[in-house]
Image (cartoon, rainbow, N blue to C red):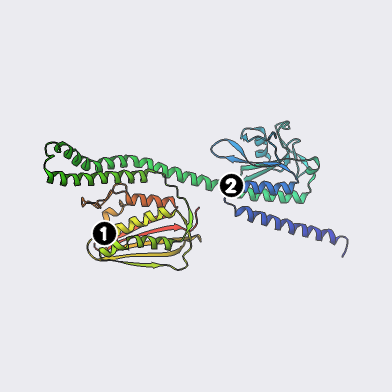
Amino acid sequence: MTDRALPQMMTAQSAAESLRRLTQFSQAIGEITSIPATAERVLSEFSEMAQCRQGALYLAEHERADFCRLAAQGLSSTEPAPLTISADHPLVRFVATHRQIADQSTGTSIAADAPLDRQSPPLDGMWGDIIIPLVNRGRLVAFVLFQSQPATRQLGSEPIELLTAMAQSAANVLDSQLICEDLRQSQTLMRRTDRLRSLETIAGGFAHEVRNPLTSIKTFIQLAPERKDDAEFMLDFSRVVLDDVYRIERLIQEILDYARHMEPKLTEEDVNEIVSSCLYFIDVQARSQEIKIEKELASELPRVMLDRQQIKQVLLNLFLNAMDAIGKQSGTLRVRTSKMMKPEGDIWVQIEVQDTGCGIPAANLERVFDPFFTTKHDGGENEGTGLGLAIAHQIVQEHRGNIHVQSAVGVGTTFRINLPSHAY
């Protein structure tokens, strides 16, 4: 081997090692879903590369024109590294303008070992000297500040190139995570806005639903003094009034359930087991109505991140509605579970609830999930409040899923619940 071949081999080995390290770093931060955890990992890797023990990572906050210190290492409680830096601060303007790994105290590009053209003087008194900008799509997403030793600033070109590539990879990941976080916050705000818009419907529906029970209670109170000796009247009317009181109590509870922000408490659950437990709960009532229960539960169904009690509430509501739709006529309640593969490759689980009941008229299908819409007006104990399906719809949405209905009068109704196997 010639003397000239040895440096070339060492350069090739160094390039291969740099590529391996960059690939491992990109894969590692790409698997992290938490922004703070990503920031900690990025700072740790950069610290090792730059051979700096004191550093901080600042991340852009979209709602405020600030960069927030999201991760730090090697700092004591008395270190002058600020918690936030305004976007108008000379340091931020400097980083956003030059977008190079630089020594801000002297205005020198470490990569090019040359002065940077800047309009502001050196930022004397600002904590930190080495700056690593994280830029994506032309926007400064974050930057890292290190307090270095003078010798550290003499990094070779290969470590600087690797650090620059790692900074770009980190910027891509953090920017994507910020976009996802903004989307989640927007979705939460939209759901809360929808609930606020429902207040008018809730108020009107509550007034309508309570008016009749209050009328019977008021009538009983007015007539009771003069007919207190009429045992038959007192017995019959007191039963009516008690039923109306129970109805008002149930209505109030369902309104509270609907109005409350129901953030699911997610745990990994077996959907088939939840379905079976709900069917067991209604088995006695189904047999008394001569309703046949058929279940087709898919084998090897993936476990799902969900709130067990909330999903049980949804299923029990659908099962009881199905039995009400079948009524006193014998019929069948079919429940199926299956695995779905979305076009983008995500795995979902579907729960299908089908009955052979009276069906829902086409004109009412679009309203079945509206608050206070009900077709149960029998005046008895099972008279609907019109909130059961609205609550079910809300719960499924809070699980990032969806629920759909198909129906034909005289044939029956099918509800399909689709849930992602993992939380977003």
Given residues 175 and 74, the one toward you in this image is 74
The N terminus: image quadrant: bottom right
Q: Nearer the viewer, mark 2 or mark 1?
A: 1
Residue 110 position, x and y percent, is 76, 43
Note whether 134 is above or below 321 in the view shown.
above
The answer to whether one can see residue 359 in this image is: no
Circles 2 and 1 in contact, beta carbons < 8 Å: no
Residue 402 appears left or right of 10: left
* Amino acid bearing label 2: Ile
Q: How many residues crowd around disc 1 within 10 Å: few (fewer than 14), some, or many (20 or more)?
A: many
Q: Residue at x 77, y 57 (%)?
A: 14
Given residues 418 and 308, the one toward you in this image is 308
Q: Mark 2 points at which residue?
A: 35
Q: How many residues crowd around disc 2 within 10 Å: few (fewer than 14), some, or many (20 or more)?
A: some
Q: Which residue is drawn at 74% across and 36% down?
A: 107
Q: Is mark 2 on a helix, strand or loop?
A: helix
* Amino acid bearing label 1: Ala
Note whether 412 is above or below 43 in the view shown.
below
Residue 262 position, x and y percent, is 42, 47
- Residue 6: quadrant of the picture: bottom right
Q: Name the residue under label 1.
A: 325
Residue 132 appears left or right of 155: left
